[in-house]
Image (cartoon, rainbow, N blue to C red):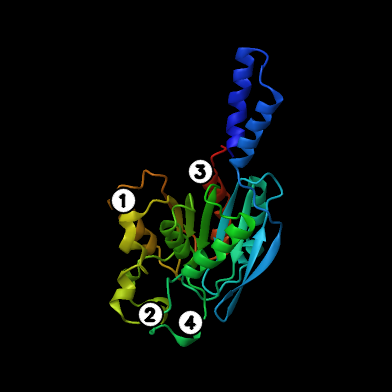
Amino acid sequence: MKLVRFLPCLLLLLAACGPSESTDEEFAEEQEVMEESTVIPSISDTTIVFKAGDFESSVIVEMPKTSFRGTILVLQGWNFPNTSWSDSSDLVELASDAGFALVMPDMGKSIYHKRIYPQTRKDWQKYPTRTWLVDTMIAQLQADYNLFDENSNNFVMGLSTGGRGALIVSQENPEVFKAGCSLSGDYDQNAFPGDNLYRGYFGSNPDQWSDDENPVSFASSWKVPMYLAHGGADSIVSVAHQYRLQTVVDSLNISQNGWAFRVDGAAEHNYDFWASEVETIIQYFEGFLEDK
């Protein structure tokens, strides 16, 4: 928060210049400006149910028990409950201690696709798109509660398919998110044509595999730095996904802009690995706070 950064400078100035001659009105005006620079969400711990077509998405909001410093959008893996992070890791506690609010939507079997296609499996067509996630859920949380205000510190994190979502959602909305994190994510579907989740949503139409459903297709416009970590022993989502993405980042010469990559050679596709990364993720996001 800018208040934290401003106070040390103000104290040094007062010490150097002697007693302040500012009037009470001037001081009140300064306080008002500082308060306006930080948008505090007007919400407490709760669960909100949103409609996404025929699908009802319960969105869990966990507010920090310390001073608010930012908001993290938490995306689950494919068909994971939106409580999986909180049930299987210390994310809620560590985020609260660091001043972060958490927003955890239920995305069902979504692969964070942009839209539904005629080729999409009928039983998967009800699950939320990332268009709904941003244009409906985030937009309503902004309007009603000041969550994800564009002047605040907003981040996104996800695991597995949710890691894919974290990459795409952050890069498509750099005005909202300052940084993101993906654990064990899958990214470039063109490099993995046999993947059944991609085939179930996109069918065999090459346009759905290469255009805006593929984050690598618009990599030249990426602006949001990411921390990506993967298990070298992952038998569900191959670490080749991360190596492929790192090659793309290196080719664009953007890796020096805050991007970070890590491979844990012995780690698998499970919460033993993901839970061990939570503290690192929080520290990574803290590096982008305006009040540090």
Residue 233 visible in the current orientation: no
Q: In the rendered view of the protein, which quadrant contains the C terminus? A: top right
Q: CA distance from mark 2 to mark 4?
A: 13 Å
**Sequence-wise, which precedes: disc 3 or disc 2?**
2
**Sequence-wise, which precedes: disc 4 or disc 3?**
4
Numbered disc in front, either 3 or 1: 3
**SS class, disc 4:** loop
In the picture of the structure, the residue carrying the numbered disc 3 is 288
Tell me the amino acid under the disc marked 2.
Answer: Arg
In the picture of the structure, the residue carrying the numbered disc 1 is 250
**Sequence-wise, which precedes: disc 2 or disc 4?**
4
Tell me the amino acid under the disc marked 4.
Answer: Gln
Q: Position of residue 120 (x, y in %)?
A: 42, 83
When the figure is inspected, residue 219 is found, relative to residue 37, above or below; the finding is below
Q: Nearer the viewer, residue 104 or 281?
A: 104
In the picture of the structure, the residue carrying the numbered disc 2 is 199
Dot 1 and dot 2 residues touching (CB under 8 Å)? no
- Horizontal arrangement in the rendering, residue 93 relative to residue 116 (left or right): right
**Sequence-wise, which precedes: disc 3 or disc 1?**
1
In the picture of the structure, the residue carrying the numbered disc 4 is 125
Q: CA distance from mark 4 to mark 3?
A: 37 Å
State the residue at coordinates (60%, 43%).
38
State the residue at coordinates (48%, 55%).
181
